[in-house]
Image: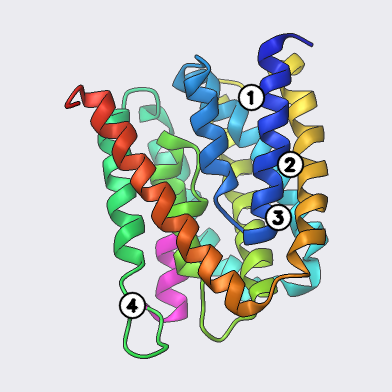
Amino acid sequence: MNALAITLTVFAFLTSALSGIAGLGGGTILIGVFFALGLTPVEAVPLFAAVQFVSNTSRTVAYIKHVEWHAAGWFALTLVPATFLLAPYAASVNENLVRLVLAGLILASLVPGRGDDAPLKPRPSFLLAGALNGSLGMFVGATGLFVGRLFFRPEWRKETTVATLAFTQVIGHGLRVIAYGFVGFSSFTQPALLIPLCIAVVAGTWTGKQLHVRMSDAHFDGLFKAILIVLSLKLVWDSVRGYGWI
């Protein structure tokens, strides 16, 4: 295993453990590492989708009894058409613009509703999450940050949020793997990277789950929102640097 594969494998374990604890956030850090280490978008995003498919599958298995299946069904209703309609354009989008859009969506999702109400009712939230996953997810790979808030329901326990978000990510990343294959960018052209990364994310998920059970709902709430804020600001920073404004 070369230095690149070792570095990516270590980060895959750490970021998957983070997602195992908080339910999101690790994927965005991992795709950022992919780009920082020199992988191009058409190399990084299909590989990332395959790795995150494995990571979220392991997380779904770990929390399977907590999945809210109706929410996943509404999510898939908009995810499927969005993914395949936009796949042909995935290699041509302006990455810096997409980062800014994502950051805006994440920060907007943190604006509180009235009292304990979520910004949207459940069904519209899940439909919007599917549309965002299938559209913006095709361009930037990581989707947990900007759809995560839509699964943060006041009536759900933290395990339901983690489980349902993980399962919907399984569907989204799986469809991205297929869609990228259709347009000529296979996830399986780098097996020396893909195999150790998949092993690392499974190990990270189970590590994160052990830490997760020790966390109260109140602490989970704070961690969830803190991750959204910090990583949305990181997206803004990366975009500004990409445009050469600083």
Residue 205 vertical position relative to residue 139 in the rendered view, above or below? below
SS assignment for the magenta stretch, majority: helix
* Separation (CA) of disc 1 from disc 2: 12 Å
**What is the span of residues highlighted in magenta in the rendered image?**
119-129
Instruction: Please tell me which residue lies in front, 143 or 1.
Output: 1
Residue drawn 32% across the image and 23% down it = 92
Q: Identify the element where label 3 is drawn.
A: helix
Residue corresponding to mark 1 = 187
Mark 4 or mark 1, which has the lower sequence index? Answer: 4
Asked if disc 2 and disc 3 are in contact, CB closer than 8 Å, the reply is: no
Q: Report if residue 34 is visible in the image.
A: yes
Asked if disc 1 and disc 3 are in contact, CB closer than 8 Å, the reply is: no
Q: Identify the element where label 4 is drawn.
A: loop
Residue corresponding to mark 3 = 20
Instruction: Please tell me which residue lies in front, 46 or 142.
Output: 142
Residue type at mark 4? Pro
Residue 38 vertical position relative to residue 56 in the rendered view, above or below? above
Asked if disc 4 and disc 1 are in contact, CB closer than 8 Å, the reply is: no
Mark 1 or mark 3, which has the lower sequence index? Answer: 3
* Separation (CA) of disc 2 from disc 3: 13 Å
Disc 2: CA contacts within 10 A as few (<14), some (14-19) or many (>=20): many
